Image (tube, rainbow, N blue to C red):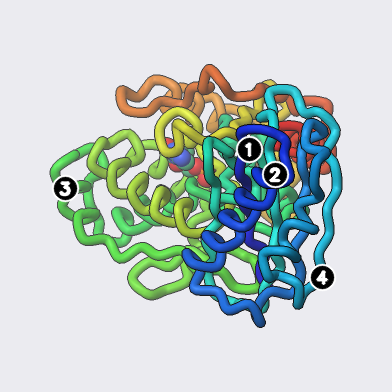
Amino acid sequence: MKAIRGATTLECDSPKEVRAKVAELLDTVAEVNGLGREEIVCIMFSSTVDIRSLYPAKAAREAGFSHCALYSSLEPDIEGGLPLCVRVMLLVERDGAVKHVYLHGARSLRRDISRTLNIALDGPAGSGKSTVAKLIASKLDILSLDTGAMYRAAALKCIREGVDYAEKSQVERVLENIDLKVKYSGGRQLTMLDGEDVSDKIRTPQVSMLASYVSAYPSVRAKMVELQRRIAARVPCVLDGRDIGTNVLPDCPFKFFLTASPEIRAERRYREDKAKGSPQTYENILEEINERDRQDANRAVAPLKRADDATVIDTSHMSAEEVAQFICKKIQEKI
Ligand code: DC
C-alpha cells in the first residue's frame, strides 16, 4: 500500500469550479501514476475553510470515483498556507514508487512524505551525532548515514596500502578507484571496503586521526560527497558528519548542529571506549579530540562549520534521547 499526495487551487468557491478542479486533480494523479481505479482504496481530501460550496468528496463521486471510500475535512488556517486549496491523499494498492501531483500553484506542505526526507546533522567529534542520528532514524523509520565512516574507510585503505598520508598524490592514487559501499542490514549501516565489512575495523584511534587527515584532500571529499548525495537522493535518511548542511546538502530544510565542550565530549568517548575495553586514558582522548577539532575546523575545503540556517543544539547537559526528541519535534513543527 502506498500514499499518493496531491493538491490544487481553485479560482473561486463555486460548485462548478470544485467539480472541475477535483476531477482534474484525480485524473492527473491516475494518469501520471498509470493508476487503475481498482487500485485506489480510499481518497481523503482536506480543503481550506474558504471552500464551502461543495465537498471535494462529493465532487470526486460525481467524477466517477465512487467505488472507493471517500472522505473530506476542512483544515484550520495555516500561516502561509494557500487560499482556496484542496489537498488530497489517495491510498493505493501499490508497492513501487508513486508520483505526487501539485497543480495550479499548489505546493507540497508535507515535505517529509512528499519528497525524500533528509536531515543534516553536523558537529565535532564526540558531540553525539551518530548516537542521535540512529535514534532519529529509528523514530522516523528512515536510515542513518554515518558519513564519517566513509572517510574512515578511505583512511583504512591508505593504511592497508601503506601510503604516506602526507603525500597528496599517493593518497589520491590509492583512493581514485576505491571500492567503497554502504549497505544496510536490519537498519544498521555496514561500511564495505573492497567487498569486506570493515564497520568495526574503522573504529581505532589510528583510523580516527588519519580519517581527519585524508578528509582534507579535495579529491577525497569530492568522491565521498558524490556518494553521499546519491544515497540521500534515493533514500530518506539522516546524515551525520561535518559538512552535510554546508556542503553535501546545502538546500536541506532540516539542519542541526550539535555542540558540547571538548571535556564533555572526551568524557563521553572515554566512557564508551572503556565499556569496549579500550586502554585509552581520558587525557589522551581529550588531546585527540582537541587535535581533531583543530584539523577539521582549519582545513581549506569544507571545514567543520555550522550552516547559517542550522539549529544549534548544545548537548552538554542533554541525553541523546532528549536531543533526538528535540530534533524530531522541530522537524514536525516545520512540516
Ligand atoms: O565523525 P567521525 O569521527 O567518524 O569522522 C571521522 C573524520 O572524518 C573526522 O575527523 C572528519 C572527517 N569527516 C569529514 O571531514 N566530513 C564528514 N562529513 C564526516 C567526517
Q: Which residue is mark 1?
A: 10
**Is the shortest distance between ligand 1 and the CB of mark 2 under 8 Å?**
no
Q: Check disc 3 and give the amino acid type.
A: Gln
The image shows residue 238 at horizontal and vertical percentages of 60, 47
Between disc 4 and disc 3, whose residue precedes?
4
Q: Determine whether label 2 and label 1 are within 8 Å by CB.
A: yes
**In the visual, does 4 lie left or right of 288?**
right
**In the visual, does 319 lie left or right of 248?**
right
Q: Determine whether label 4 and label 3 are within 8 Å by CB.
A: no
**In the visual, does 240 lie left or right of 60?**
left
Mark 3 or 1: the one toward you? 1
Which disc number belongs to residue 119?
A: none
Q: Check disc 2 and give the amino acid type.
A: Val
Q: Which residue is mark 3?
A: 170
Q: Check disc 1 and give the amino acid type.
A: Leu
Q: Secondary structure at mark 4?
A: strand
C-alpha gap between disc 3 and disc 1: 62 Å
Q: Is residue 285 visible?
A: no
C-alpha gap between disc 4 and disc 3: 64 Å
Residue drawn 59% across the image and 24% down it: 310
Residue drawn 63% across the image and 38% down it: 10
**Is the shortest distance between ligand 1 and the CB of mark 4 under 8 Å?**
no
Mark 1 or 4: the one toward you? 1
Q: Determine whether label 3 and label 1 are within 8 Å by CB.
A: no
C-alpha gap between disc 3 and disc 2: 59 Å
Residue drawn 78% across the image and 47% down it: 46
Q: Secondary structure at mark 1?
A: loop
Q: Which residue is mark 2?
A: 86
